[in-house]
Image (cartoon, rainbow, N blue to C red):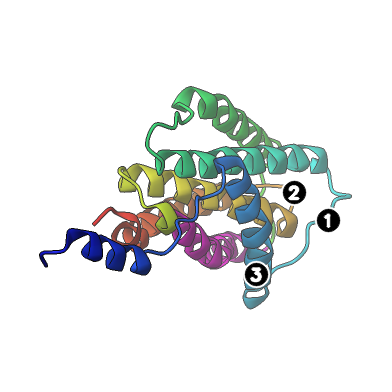
Amino acid sequence: MADHDLFIEQLSRTIEPVKRPWQPGWRVVAWIVMALPCGALASLLVHRTFTDWSQTGAAWVIFQLFLTFLTGTLAIRNAFLLSIAGQQSLSWKWFAPLVSLWLVITFTNMRLHHLPPVQGNEVGTNCYLFMVVVSVPMMAIVIGYLRRTRTLFPARSLAAAGAGVACMALTLLALCHPTHVSALDFLMHISATATIVLGTMALGYKWVSLP
């Protein structure tokens, strides 16, 4: 086309306005508002019993619930920060104290309850199933959010997102789990966390990577 001005004018007519993504903090809030209710609805698909807060050690469970929610929120924020060039994400030093404290409380809980519950195997199996099932909608939503901006570091962003989803799944599990934790429970929690992180990375890599 010889007339460059006409060509530029035609291209300008086809260009759609660019919508700036929300700030990472608002994206995290919006994701939590959407993801947690969807995860709670997904929990209706699996067998669960609500936590009896009158049991011994309930205060520690509430504290653990707060830790997992805080860790999950920071991990999701990191995933969104990594998807935007120039943004500074939190280092592992922020997460190490939170995860260490969670582990200390968990091992203390296990030490105080030497004998597993009567249906220990069933509880342990349900822990894994519960976490994986409730994570599916939360995983899909966070991948959708990351696809909005794409990312230069898809593996790191998705790993952080998967860790955040796993923490939120643990948060929901705390509402449907006995206050005591057995060794099998702990193993199922770790296995489900690994499954969620790897699943988020495998399912989302194609969608959030830059073309």
Residue under label 3, please give it.
Answer: 43
* Residue shown at the point (24%, 65%) measured from the top left: 6
Q: Position of residue 100 (x, y in %)?
A: 56, 28
Q: Which quadrant of the figure has residue 206?
A: bottom left
Label 2, secondary structure: give it.
loop
Task: Tell whether 73 sits left or right of 92.
Answer: right
Q: Residues within 10 Å of mark 3 (few under 14, many from 20)?
A: many
Residue placed most toward the observer, 158 or 53: 158
Q: What amino acid is labelled 3 in the image?
A: Ser
Q: Residues within 10 Å of mark 1 (few under 14, many from 20)?
A: few
Query: Which contiguous range is marked in magenta?
Result: 119-146
Q: Which quadrant of the figure has residue 68?
A: top right
Separation of residues labelled 3 and 2 (CA atoms) = 19 Å
Separation of residues labelled 2 and 1 (CA atoms) = 7 Å
Residue under label 2, please give it.
Answer: 179
Label 1, secondary structure: give it.
loop
Task: Tell whether 195 sits left or right of 119.
Answer: left
| Quadrant that contains the C terminus | bottom left
**Does residue 182 appear in this view?**
no
Residue under label 1, please give it.
Answer: 52
Dot 3 and dot 2 residues touching (CB under 8 Å):
no
Q: Position of residue 149 (x, y in %)?
A: 41, 52
Is residue 39 within the magenta segment?
no
Q: Earlier in the sequence, mark 3 or mark 1?
A: 3
Q: Find residue 9 and name its label.
A: none
Question: Disc 3 or disc 2, which is closer to the eye?
Answer: 3
Separation of residues labelled 3 and 1 (CA atoms) = 18 Å
